[in-house]
Image (spheres, coloured by chain):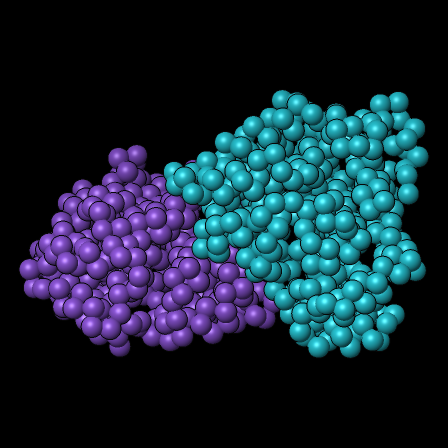
Chain colours: A cyan, B purple
């Protein structure tokens, strides 16, 4: 689902990651340098865990999104330091949740290497996550009340999404609405906060701020849906963790919800509440990989991308808007 | 170590808890009502855990301290809502750390009943802790940058203190300085932040703000030292958890550091790195309860209280200052 606007713009970057980031490359570099510094703690163990997780790893999708929205909404260079801080804060929050999620899910692989939880155990990972949360709010301190509240409320939604996901584990009655509610809280809320804050910092009007919040919601949902599809499509080398982790954890991912809907035998197996292993696991993965189900999953992600492109259309054309369009399209390219 | 100022003031409250709180009773009630509301989440499980931990439990020592400092520094009723919010934020942060500490230490009893960790397990307790942190920062959003930063930096110190405590576990070479560094970060930093923020909100001058930060440090240290003594003196019914928890966890508490210093056989046992149980545990407790060691521990706590009283002397006499003096003295009464 390529967007003609992006493809047509004179400065349209190629859909590869560096290309998409090109218009905000300097801002991203500044963010990266400051982010790295903020990982340092008086306690060497905390620094070590945070650098291990964050340095040179991760797509920096949230900072990229925030910086592009800031510029696409007319944000000026004189005040870009604010947008950079917001970008860093959200990446810190995201990193904190990765540390805590791996503890909760017993995740042993993260970004293609042993998770912090696997390497240092749960206590250091837990505390390092708390440290990253606090660093984010230390950075947020300089913003207006509404921006700090937006960030804090996104974090609250993250925690609620985590609990809802746990509540829905092995629930074969889980609906699309349930699924959407989980990913909205667990993933999209942080993108939505990013879009809102970035537009606000850029001095955009209320209507644009609301649109950029919705853009974040749609981008975050599309991103999570594609991530869910990749979880069963793999391969492990590409996704940096074992194929089918969501299924093993009983998590109602997009392919799980689709398979529940179309295959009563899958629903029975999923409902049992025990980890699906061995031959049953292979059978379940095969069902979830059925071309018609994958196509349905892709179509749902494409719906979100269409919403996102529609919201972008309200912005003035610019290299930044073109990059946002390319960033959206990249999501559909990720799983081919 | 009663303070004559406190005893002499016409409105001096008795040293029991209600008495000390009397001058800020209405503010505390307002804080309590709002605190209770902030424990509510869209996820019933989070609400349940937070209410279970916080409602009607805990001494509310941090809110009481902040509200008394605010008033003692001349804070007016018109702006007390700010001090109330700061008081609530610090109690939320404190509660979050209790949830995470119990996970890390495997604490099964808290405030005389099963801990949240014992009742709901580690994942819900972890997420509920994150929720409380976020709620605190949501509330802090309305404050100036320096206040938000003060709160965030106190939280960072809490995490660093937690890691340092872990690093020093079963370390028979731990010195008094190490011990002081751990409790300063783990406990006193939050009181110090409270004192600083409260004085700042009251409109005090820089010198008074610095003094109230130091007051928080001294009160926090005294409080932790007395808590450490109570941990081995018990009884369980009074302290709400098993006697000798610190020793079992290999934590360098005040009695542990004193026993290491005076009893080589204790140091050997402690250094072994395995939980001290059975007859060895009884022997260790007996050593730590030696009257001379307890007296030494009390004297160290009294040193901190003396520092605190000295700092109070710089404030204008008032019922609030008298209550702060009584609150300090209460610490020494707690273990008789």
Where the C terminus of chain B falls, by quadrant?
Answer: bottom left
Residue A274 percent location from the top left of the image:
66, 73
Q: Nearer the viewer, residue A314 or A332?
A: A332
**Above or below: residue B74 compared with residue B105:** above
Tell whether A296 sits left or right of B84.
right
Q: Nearer the viewer, residue A164 or B274?
A: B274
Farthest left residue in view: B292
Residue B239 percent location from the top left of the image:
27, 70
Picture quadrant where residue A26 is located: top right
Tell whether B70 sits left or right of B136.
left
**Above or below: residue B242 compared with residue A79:** below
Tell whether B15 sits left or right of B59.
left
Farthest front residue in view: A279
Number of numbered discs visible in the structure rendering: 0
Tell whether B111 sits left or right of A225.
left
Residue B166 percent location from the top left of the image:
35, 52
**Above or below: residue A141 compared with residue B58:** above
Picture quadrant where residue A334 is located: top right
Q: Residue at x 45, y 51 (%)?
A: A124
Where the N terminus of chain B falls, by quadrant?
Answer: bottom left
Q: Residue at x 78, y 60 (%)?
A: A254
Q: Residue at x 72, y 63 (%)?
A: A247
Residue B319 seen in this snapshot: no
Residue A300 seen in this snapshot: yes
**Above or below: residue B108 compared with residue A316:** below
Residue B35 percent location from the top left of the image:
46, 63
């Amino acid at each position: 689902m390529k967007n003609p606007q992006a493809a047509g713009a004179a400065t349209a970057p190629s859909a590869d990651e560096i290309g998409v980031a090109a218009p905000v490359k300097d801002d991203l570099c500044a963010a990266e340098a400051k982010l790295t510094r903020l990982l340092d703690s008086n306690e060497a163990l905390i620094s070590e865990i945070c650098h291990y997780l964050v340095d040179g790893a991760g797509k920096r999708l949230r900072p990229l999104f925030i910086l592009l929205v800031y510029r696409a909404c007319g944000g000026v260079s004189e005040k870009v330091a604010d947008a950079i801080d917001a970008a860093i804060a959200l990446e810190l929050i995201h990193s904190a949740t990765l540390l805590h999620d791996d503890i909760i899910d017993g995740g042993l692989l993260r970004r293609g290497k042993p998770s912090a939880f696997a390497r240092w155990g749960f206590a250091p990972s837990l505390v390092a996550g708390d440290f990253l949360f606090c660093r984010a709010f230390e950075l947020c301190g300089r913003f207006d009340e509404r921006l700090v509240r937006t960030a804090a409320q996104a974090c609250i939604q993250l925690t609620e999404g985590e609990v809802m996901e746990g509540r829905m584990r092995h629930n074969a009655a889980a609906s699309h609405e349930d699924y959407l509610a989980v990913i909205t809280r667990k993933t999209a809320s942080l993108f939505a906060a990013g879009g809102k804050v970035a537009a606000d910092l850029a001095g955009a009007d209320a209507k644009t701020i609301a649109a950029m919040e919705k853009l974040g919601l749609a981008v975050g949902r599309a991103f999570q849906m594609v991530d869910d599809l990749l979880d069963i499509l793999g391969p492990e080398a590409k996704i940096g963790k074992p194929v089918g982790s969501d299924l093993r954890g009983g998590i109602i991912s997009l392919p799980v919800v689709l398979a529940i809907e179309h295959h009563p035998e899958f629903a029975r197996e999923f409902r049992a509440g025990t980890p699906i292993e061995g031959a049953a696991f292979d059978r379940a993965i095969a069902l979830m990989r059925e071309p018609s189900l994958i196509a349905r999953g892709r179509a749902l992600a494409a719906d979100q991308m269409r919403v996102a492109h529609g919201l972008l259309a309200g912005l003035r054309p610019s290299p930044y808007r073109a990059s946002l369009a390319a960033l959206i399209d990249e999501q559909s390219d990720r799983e081919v």
